[in-house]
Image (spheres, rainbow, N blue to C red):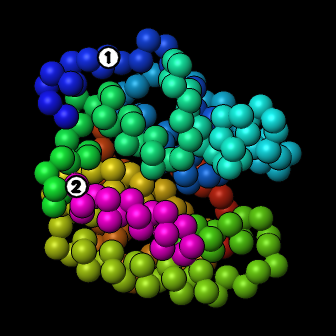
Amino acid sequence: MSPAAASTFPTRPAQPIKLYRSRISGHSHRVELFLSLLGLPFEPVDIDLAARGHKTPEFLAMNAFGQVPVIQDGDVTLADSNAILVYLAGRYAANAEQWLPREPLAAAAVQRWLSVAAGQLAFGPAAARVIQLFKRPDSPDVAIARAHALFTVMEQQLGQSAFLAGSTPTLADIANYSYIARAPEGNVSLAPYPHLRAWLARIEALPRFVPMVKTPIGLAA
């Protein structure tokens, strides 16, 4: 984004951003984490998933897929956690190009890990945690195997760079952090992955970091 384009946006919202979330959702947490890292005012609105609060007509009017999170920023209503991260970085981050670079190769590196967050992460450690969290009858074996396959790749990457897409944190790290930090809740051990655990610690050391709620299930019980 050019300086001229950036100047058309306010550096802070006129009023707190509403974040429709579930505290046990890693998708919700990645947005809450980024809002906090940017120092933006926000108002959390908890949606009761057990009571199907995400399937009410009012919620479906904000997100037809019936999924958290959703944000309302003035007259902007936006769903999908990764899309929200991109919006927040572009609209409010003073260092927007750190979080989402414009240089083609650097931008591609971040996009790769956003795709991982929507793919291998969602169907690996996130899915294994959901089975434990909601006591589903599904076998977790495939999800756990996918998680370890993903973590093996990430371990190799993080042996070469401090963060997923380079030497500084980007949206790639924010999008992947939450479900990896809580992977033991889905019976996925982080013990074999020292570089991955060191990466988690680096994110947790960022100014204004906020942790995801812990649930005593799986290996975390």
Q: Quadrant of residue 209?
A: top left
Residue 76's spot in the image, x, y percent?
Answer: 51, 25
Residue occupying the far right of the picture: 51
**Residue span colored magenta:** 107-124
Q: Are marks 2 and 1 in contact (CB under 8 Å)?
A: no
In percent of the image, x 39 and y 36: which residue is there? 87
Disc number placed over residue 10 in the picture, else none: 1
Q: Residue at x 33, y 50 (%)?
A: 171
Q: CA distance from mark 2 to mark 1?
A: 24 Å
The answer to whether residue 121 is magenta is yes
Left/right placement of residue 217 relative to residue 95 reads right
149 lies left or right of 169: right
* Left or right of 196 on screen, residue 120: right
Q: Residue at x 82, y 38 (%)?
A: 56
Q: Secondary structure at mark 2?
A: helix
Seen in the picture, residue 12 relative to 48 is either above or below; the reply is: above
x 26%, y 80%: residue: 156
Mark 2 — residue?
107
In the picture, the quarter occupied by the N terminus is top left
Coordinates of residue 20 in the picture (x, y in percent): 63, 35
Q: Is residue 211 left or right of residue 61?
A: left
**Mark 1: amino acid:** Pro
Residue lying furthest top in this view?
14
Few, some or many C-alpha atoms within 10 Å of disc 1 (few <14, some 14-19, many ≥20)?
few
In the image, residue 131 sits, relative to residue 102, either above or below, namely: below
Tell me the crowding category of disc 2: few under 14, some 14 to 19, or many 20 or more residues within 10 angstroms, Cα based: some
